[in-house]
Image: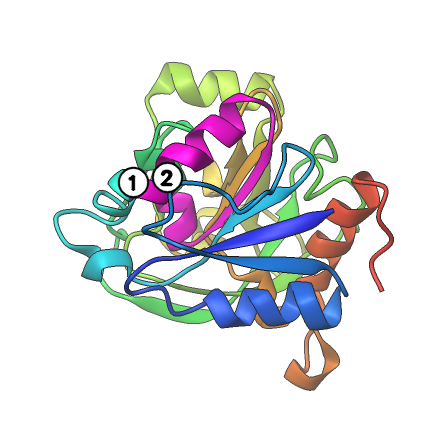
Amino acid sequence: MRFGVVIFPGSNCDQDIIHVLRDVCQCEVIELWHKQTDLSGLTTDDCIVLPGGFSYGDALRTGAIARFSPIMQAVIRHCNEGGFAWGICNGFQILCEAGLLPGVLLENANQQFICKNVWLKADNHASRVNATVEDRPLSIPIAHAEGRYYADAATIEALENNQQVLFRYCDADGNVTAAANPNGAVNNIAGVCNKERNVYGMMPHPERAAEGALGNTDGYQLFASFLAAAGTMAS
């Protein structure tokens, strides 16, 4: 499996995710520039990653301009044809803006930028990114000002019934509580997937907790899970 990492003006986590995928997971990575109109030979067996950052300076609304970048037309076609995509933080916002994932990311409830380690746990094991993740709280960093997941009641009900919630914010003991919710997200939702389970979005940054040099490898479990589900062993 290969990964294509899209780089927008304002992306600031692209090199982080490239390092984890290429050097830690030993995967082939192709860097994709936002002005491209194709995916440089990547197929539906491969995964497109939209990294964190401040695409286009978060002008108008987070992800709103990036959604119209030339590369996104190719990403949308890729996903609609069954190809995989994974958006992290700003990448999650872009996927929602593009209509590839349900819901939106609103301003944090405290109206402040939040940058800290939080606890989250897999809500189920029904998708590639959480299929083999341990049933325990994971310590994963967040860094966002607009990370409050929101959708209308009918959409939330469908997400819950279809096991499309990937992760929820929790406390160190795994309790999903209001106090453990860093941004006010509905139902403590930290990540979701589409109903076809080939598009994934999450606000926490697993790439910032994916190797021993960082003092935390909890995030690596997500990459290992994805690769295991794809039939590729993570190193």
Badge 1: how crowded within 10 Å, few (<14), some, or many (20+)? Answer: many
Residue 162, above or below 126: above
In percent of width and height, residue 115 lies at 39, 71
Residue range in magenta is 70-94
Q: In this view, does 25 lie to the left or right of 178?
A: right
Tell which tag, 1 or 2, sits nearer the viewer: 2
What label sits on residue 67 in the rendered view?
1
Question: Left or right: where does residue 91 sit relative to residue 166?
Answer: left
- Percent across and percent down for residue 155 are 41, 19
The reply to whether the magenta stretch includes residue 165 is no
- Side of 221 relative to 66 (left or right): right
Tag 2 residue = 72
Task: Mark 1 and mark 2 in contact? Answer it, CB < 8 Å.
Answer: yes
Residue at horizontal 25 percent and vertical 39 percent from the top: 68
- Image quarter (top left, top right, bottom left or bottom right) of the C terminus: bottom right
Q: Name the foreground residue: 192 vs 135.
A: 192
Q: Nearer the viewer, residue 144 or 227?
A: 227
- Residue type at the position of mark 1: Arg
